[in-house]
Amino acid sequence: MPRRAPRTDRRGVAGDRPRGARGDHGQPEPPAGPRIIGGSLRGRRLDYVPEAGAEGGPARTRPMKDRVRETLFDLLGPTVKDRVAIDLFAGTGALGFEALSRGAARAIFVERHFPTADALVRSAAALGVSAATDVRPGDALIWAKRLPADLPGSSPWVVFISPPWTFFTDRAADIRALLTALVGAAPPGSTFVVESDAAFDAAILPDAPVWRRHDIPPAVLYLLEGLL
C-alpha cells in the first residue's frame, strides 16, 4: 500500500497547518495577525479581526502582504524616523505600527470598523506603545470635507493610504478629494504612500511634484516625498 504524502499548506511546507485549520480540540484556529518586520518591535504580532465583509463579500481587513510592506519600508528608509505616521483605512495597523517600530514619534490610526479599531487599541497596549498611538474610529473619507483641527503641524507626516482596492474605482472622486486635502495640509517634508493594484488609474492622484511608482505584485505603490 503506497504511503500517503504528508499534508502541506498552500506554500508546500509539510506538516504546517493551513490558515483556518482545526486545532487539537476540533475548534478552528484563528488566523494569525501580521508580524512586524523590522525595528524595535520586530517579530511581534498584531491583533487581527478576520470577519468577512457584509453579505459574504471580501474581508473587511486586507493586511498588506509582508513582502510589499518590507519593500515599502526599504524604500522609505530613515524617512519615518521622528515623523507622525497617519495610517488611514488602518485595518490591523501594520503600516502605522511598523512606522513606530522604525522610529516614528507618533501614529494616528483611522478605521471605520469599530471591532477592528478596538483591536488596534489592544495591539498598541500589547506592544507597549499606547502613549504614542491615537486610534480614531470613523470613516477616513470624511477627512476630505474637514480635516481634524488637532492634526500635528510641527512635524512632517508619513501618510499611508491603503483602502480596499475597489475604492479606487467605486469611490475614486472621494479618494482624490481625500488625497488633495491631505497633500494641501501636510507640513513641509511630508511623505505620502498610496497602495493599489495594477488597475489603478493614476489620474486619481492630486497634482504634486513627482509621484514615484513601484510595482510589487500584486500591489502597486505610489510615493510622494519631500513636500515643500
Image: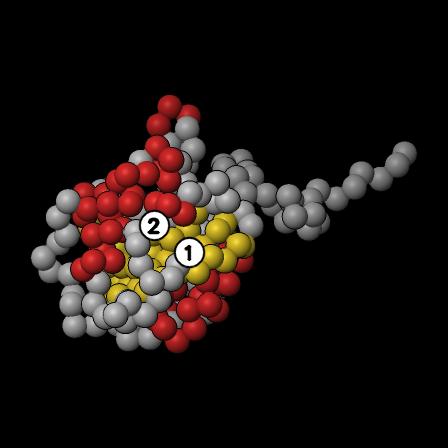
Quarter assignment of residue 148: bottom left
Q: Nearer the viewer, residue 28 or 55?
A: 55
Q: Which mark is residue 222?
A: 1
Does the CB distance between marks 1 and 2 fall below 8 Å?
yes
Mark drawn on residue 173: none
Quarter occupied by residue 221: bottom left
Residue 55 versus residue 81 in the image, above or below: above
**SS class of the residue under badge 1?**
strand
Q: Position of residue 39 (x, y in %)?
A: 42, 72
Q: In the visual, does 21 lie left or right of 42?
A: right
Q: Which residue is at a point 69% across and 44% down the rendered structure image?
A: 8
| Coordinates of residue 73 in the picture (x, y in percent) | 44, 66
Q: Residues within 10 Å of mark 2 (few under 14, many from 20)?
A: some
Which residue shows up at 47% across the image and 57% down it? 213
Pick out the residue farthest to the left.
149
**Residue 134 drawn above or below residue 17:** below
Please give left or right for residue 112 compared with residue 169 in the image. left
Q: Secondary structure at mark 2?
A: loop
Q: What residue appears at the point 90 percent right and 34 percent down from the top-left corner?
A: 1
Task: Indicate the amino acid at tag 1.
Answer: Tyr
The amino acid on which the numbered mark 2 sits, given as a three-letter code, is Leu
First of labels 1, 2 by sequence position: 2
Instruction: Report whether residue 140 is seen.
Output: no
Q: Which residue corresponds to mark 2?
A: 205
Residue 219 position in % (x across, y down): 50, 49
Please name whichever residue, 146 or 82, is drawn nearer the observer in this view of the structure.
Answer: 146
Residue 198, percent from left and from top: 50, 44
Q: Is residue 160 visible?
A: yes
